[in-house]
Image (cartoon, rainbow, N blue to C red):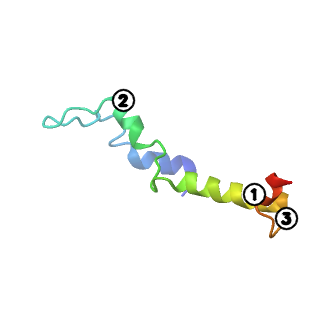
Amino acid sequence: MNRLENTHRYDDIIDLPHPVSKKHPQMPSEDRAAQFSPFAALTGYERAIREKEMQHEERMMLGEGISRETYDSE
């Protein structure tokens, strides 16, 4: 089946009106958009990752075995 034939599969319903519920009001656009926005599934995860990254970078800059206190006291 080629692409043109595929589009004719829906000829019987393509011009029908969009169904609208009589029981439920239509959701506002802002609320609909919020359903697709990103969310933080794990609260505090990003902060914990940043803290670990900073600790790792500090160890790399100061060298293994040298604490921040040792570096600051020199």
Q: Tell me the SS state at disc 2.
A: helix
Identify the residue under disc 2: 29
Residue 63: mark in rendering: 3
Residue 2 visible here: no
Q: Name the residue located 44 percent from the left edge and 43 percent from the top edge.
A: 36
Mark 3 or 2: in front is 3
Q: Name the residue located 20 percent from the left edge and 32 percent from the top edge.
A: 25
Whether the residues at callouts 3 and 2 have beta carbons within 8 Å, the answer is: no
Q: CA distance from mark 1 to mark 3?
A: 13 Å
- Amino acid bearing label 3: Gly
| Residues packed near mark 2 inside 10 Å, few (<14), some (14 to 19) or many (20 plus) | few
* Left/right of residue 65 with respect to residue 26 in the rendered view: right
Camera-side residue: 63 or 14?
Answer: 63
- Amino acid bearing label 1: Glu
Camera-side residue: 20 or 69?
Answer: 69
* Left/right of residue 46 with respect to residue 17 in the rendered view: right
The answer to which quarter of the image holds residue 16 is top left
Identify the residue under disc 1: 69
| Quadrant where the C terminus is found in the figure | bottom right
